[in-house]
Amino acid sequence: MSNPPAPLSTWARNVSPSPTLAVDAKAKALQAAGEDVCGFAAGEPDFDTPEHIKDACIAALKGGKTKYAPTPGIEPLRQAIVDRYAAEYGLKAAPSQVIVSPGGKFNCYLGVLATCSPGDEVIVPAPFWVSYPEMVKLAGAVPKFVLADDTTGFRLTPAMVEAAITPKTKLLILNSPSNPTGAVYSRQELEAIVAVAMKHNLYILSDEMYEHLVYDGAKPTCIATFSKEVEARTITVAGFSKTYAMTGWRIGTTLAPAPIAKAISELQSQMSSNVTTFAQYGALAALKEKEKTSAALKTMLVAFDRRRKFLHAELNKIPGVTCLLAEGAFYLFPNISSFGLKDLDFCNRLLDVEKVAAVPGSAFGAEGYLRLSYATSDEIIKKGVDRLARFCASLKK
Ligand SMILES: *Cc1c(COP(=O)(O)O)cnc(C)c1O
């Protein structure tokens, strides 16, 4: 009789699969089985990629852009990324500071790998995007969660950050506009938090994936613009997935100080090499054909804003539910703690009884909330929130 195979690695045994993708998969399976599901779980725009971006990719593919490209990205795309940071934020950088990676998620992971050694501590504001803790653990580092609930608008204060810092703290992750809460920090709020990070000589990973999805006149903040000192310690991640409805393309961007950019590029050269070469030409068109791109973005923003306001108003009409009006991304994060159910039970029952898919706040490190994505049709939002109201009423009986 042979022995059983040896156990898998600690990495394989300790990683948690993405809970948001899991809820979405369950909802899609129910839908495929013929159920009428209202899905609020998706973390991607319901729009298709604009035509001119697809056309540029197709032309590149037909034109033979089918070989390896430089690891950190094709030169014109890196230049276009530098140009847009200059135009949007007045930030001056060199193309060598830009790395194009296979999805913003991988940009974030490489940022963690480039700065953190085993045993280092990373401050992760909660509610957090589900991948941060896992990335930190995969680097052998230790996530330190700091919870900012709805009483502070899901935004950390400098004192909360200060209290979480130890001699082992190496990195602070910031994500404004936020997934899952949609919260947008003001520039002043970020300056105060970043000052704490500078005092303790921390690196900052600023995930600015939703920078262009803001409402009510809210302004995105590019943290690297604060000062030379901040710029030298800040890794800025952004991308194409959310702004241009390109989640399936797998293209994200990092802007980092030269030594970090070099390290990230070298890590990527051994882990994945370049992003799909012809896809990069689509991304280039997104940045170059500015008028078409901003028209497409405008259309999305108008729809998102309308749905945001509608969903927010309807949620607050439900007895027992309270919800802040988030200023960014495409999520609302209502508080459902008054129902006395664990949020995971709440979500499971909501899906079973009313066929409404939502992600429990606990998946983001904040028990007692739901994450509802309004990147779905007005009809589904209307129908889904009616069902949610009925479900909540049934719990109150
Ligand atoms: C979607 C998302 C990303 C990365 O998206 P990719 O699809 O990997 O480009 C990064 N950060 C946050 C907060 C996100 O929501």
Image (cartoon, rainbow, N blue to C red):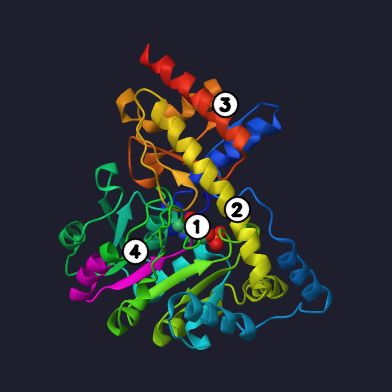
Q: Name which residue lies at 53% across and 20% down.
A: 353
In the structure shown, which secondary structural element does the residue marked by tag 1 occupy? loop
Marks 3 and 2: which is nearer the front? 2
Sequence-wise, the earlier of marks 4 and 2 is 4
Give the residue pinned by disc 4: 173
Please, is residue 73 above or below residue 340 in the view? below
Residue type at numbered disc 2: Met
Q: Is residue 58 magenta?
A: no
Q: What stretch of residues is rendered in magenta?
A: 191-209
Q: Which quadrant holds the C terminus? A: top left
Q: From the viewer's perspective, is residue 53 above or below residue 319?
A: below
Ligand 1 within 8 Å, label 2 CB: no
Label 3 sits on residue: 355
Distance of mark 4 from mark 3, alpha carbons? 35 Å
Q: CA distance from mark 1 to mark 3?
A: 28 Å
Residues at badges 4 and 2 in contact (C-beta under 8 Å)? no
Residue depicted at 60% across the width and 33% down the height:
380
Q: Is residue 44 left or right of residue 139?
A: right
* Real-space CA distance between mark 4 and mark 1, rounded to the nearest whole angstrom: 20 Å
Give the left or right position of residue 167, taking residue 139 as reference: left
Q: What kind of residue is marked 3?
A: Lys
Q: Which residue is mark 1?
A: 213
